[in-house]
Structure formats: structure tokens, C-alpha cells
Amino acid sequence: MKRLWAFRVWHGLVSVPVAAGVGVITNLATEGFPWALTAGLVVLVLVQVGLSVWQAVGDQRDRRDARDELLGSLRPPVPPSPVPIESPAQDDSCSVLRVGAVVGWLTAPFTPTPLWGRKVVLDRLVAWCVTSGSGADVVRVVTGPAGVGKSRLALAVAQALPAGWMAGRLRDDAAGLVERIAAAGDRTLVIVDDAESAAASAMETLVTGAVRHPDLIRVLLLARTDAALRFLSDDVRPRLAGVEVLGPVGEAGDRQRWFIEAARAYARTWRVPAPDLPDRPVGRRRGHPAGVTRPRPAGGAGPQRHPHVVADRSDDRTGEPGTALLAVRSASVTGRMRYRGTGRGGGSVAAAARVQRGRNS
């Protein structure tokens, strides 16, 4: 491809002076100025320039497509809404919200919530990406327990990069990825989720290749602990010195505010009414449960049900996968949040908000 591009450049540089020379010779060999011939030569030159530009754009598009074949998208197809098109308000047997459809919306690519409490580390990672030079670090590691928000932070970093940057996730095999990134010529951030589970050969290939292009490539590794990356060789491990450790953030008041913002964000995205919000702080602090739901009978008539505690935890660690699934399942099955009781889709919104608040804290 490089050889073909060089030939096209050479052809364009040669054809222009040749056409001009033909025009000069023709002018000297004839008594009058050959307007028709000159106009024809000008048209040919313009056509040649246009074709060269078109071919160059096509070649660049092909190189980017080749890169994207090995670089996973940060925005996969959006999962279906957990709220059915037709509300089954008249049928109690079908009124429980679909738990499986909610879980996909809790993952980093699809959550409509902002990134809470991570601005300092976000700015630091963006600055690391845009810093260029032969001595620039090409690899950073972000560690933290499951559900603490590593993937959400990585996505926010990708979104905050300046124009001209590309970002994507490492697929199963890194063979050829660095070469294709270099051929495309765009500065690129490669995110490796669950780096401790990635193949050692793929990690070695990616890191060693990225080191050869410090002005072009940045690699962001996400893992539960940096100790989990000890399977890498002695040549690669020194490149992993830069580590950002994430932990739970925010106090009880912050979590309550984030919960309210999350509930409203999911309601807007799913185009459903926002559910009733909890009347107690969210997050276990001094005996407070993770969240409280108060389902109401249809039309507000009848006695109130007892508050149902969702995902009561004994410590401050938030966002664990088991807790997340428990919160969703408790809200939609045990709590029996029905459409007519919480507003269409309200149960899913509340459950998603509770879990998302934990994932960002």
C-alpha cells in the first residue's frame, strides 16, 4: 500500500510539469496561443489532482477500517429497553419488570449517568494520554475491586480526548494491531478490560509494540490488582509502573444525590416516569441499608406495603457484581414493583439507579 501511494504521488508530481511543458512547446511551435489545447491540459491536470486526492482518502479509509477490525468498539449496540412497549397494567402475572434486560444497562457503555467523584484521576489520565515525546509512558494501569467503576472511568477518558484521537478495546488477539494503528496514523488509546484475564502473548505483543510508538499509542490496562499482571515477562513489567488505584468515593449525602440523579437519568433514557425516590440516605453508613423501596398499590389506594430493604450490606464496599444482581432482582421480583404501582418502568429505574450509584462510588 505504501508503494502504491508513493507511485501515485510521483505520478502526480511528474504529470503536472509535463503538461505545462507541452503547453509551452506548443505555444512556441505555433503562431497563436493555443487556448483550446491549454484548456484541455488544465482540465487534465485538475482531473489528475482530483483522482490523487480521492485515492488518498480511500487509502486512508482502508487503513482505518483495517485497524478497526482488530480494535473493539467502545459503544456496542444498545440493549433493548427493559420496559415493554405495551404496559401490562391489567395483568398482574406479567407486570414484573424484566431483570435480564436491566442488567445490560448497568454496564459502562450504556449507563446514562455521568462519572461521579473521579474528576482528579480523569484529568490525570487524559493528561497522560496527550503528553507526547520519546520519553512518555505508553502504559497505565487502573486497579480496583469489581464494580468500582474502572470501565466507566476508561470510557470517560476516551470521551475526553481531544479531536483526532481514536479509542477502542483490545480484542482477543493483539497480533497486527500496533502495525495497523501506525499505518492509520491516528493517535489511539487501547483499553484492555480485565487485563488479568487477557492472554499473556497478546499483552506482550501490545505493550512491546506500543513502546515503539510513544507519540502514537497509549495503552490503559484495567485489572483488580496490579499483582494480577505478574504473569507478564520481565521486559514488560517495568512498563506497568504507573498505577491508579480506585476505591469507593463519596459520603452518604453524595450517594443519595447520585441515586436521585441516576434514577432521573434512567427514566429520561427509557422515557418512563421517574419512580418514588428513597427517603433515607443511600449507602450503608452507621446502620443504614443500601436502599429502600416503597411500592404503592394502584391509584394510591389501600394500605402501604412495608419498606423493602434492597441489598443490605455489612461494609462500605459498593458495586460488587453479586450485590448489583441482588439489588436488581430484589427490586423486580421480591419487591414486586409493578407498573401500576410505581409508574411504568419505575421499578427498573430505581433498581438501576441503586446499582449504578454503587458502580460509580
Image (spheres, rainbow, N blue to C red):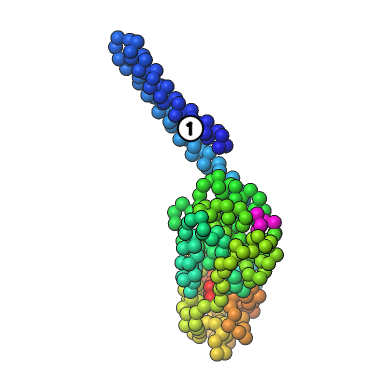
Q: Residue furthest left?
A: 32
204 inside magenta stretch: yes
Q: Is residue 189 above or below residue 334?
A: above
Farthest residue in the bottom direction? 286
Which contiguous range is marked in magenta?
201-205
In the image, what residue occupies the spot 51% across and 38% down?
58
**Taking the image as drawn, is residue 327 in sight?**
yes
In the rendering, at what x and y percent does residue 131 appear?
Answer: 47, 59
Corner quadrant of residue 99? bottom right
Which SS class for mark 1? Answer: helix
Find out whether residue 59 is within the magenta segment: no
Per the image, the residue denoted by label 1 is 9
Q: Crowdedness of circle 1 by 10 Å Cα count: few (<14), some, many (20+)?
A: some
Q: Main secondary structure of the magenta part?
A: helix
Q: In the figure, 343 relative to 157: above or below? A: below
359 shown above or below 208: below
| Residue 324, horizontal then vertical, whole percent | 61, 74
At 42% from the left and 22% from the top, the residue drawn is 18
- Residue type highlighted by circle 1: Val
Q: In this orientation, which residue lies closer to the viewer: 160 or 357?
A: 160
Q: Nearer the viewer, residue 293 or 303?
A: 293
Seen at 61% across and 57% down, the residue is 207
* Residue 308 visible somewhere in the drawing: no
Which residue occupies 29% across, 12% down? 32
Most foreground residue, 351 or 247: 247
Placement of the N terminus among the 4 image quadrants:
top right
Number of numbered callouts drawn: 1
Residue 134 picture location, percent across and down:
51, 55
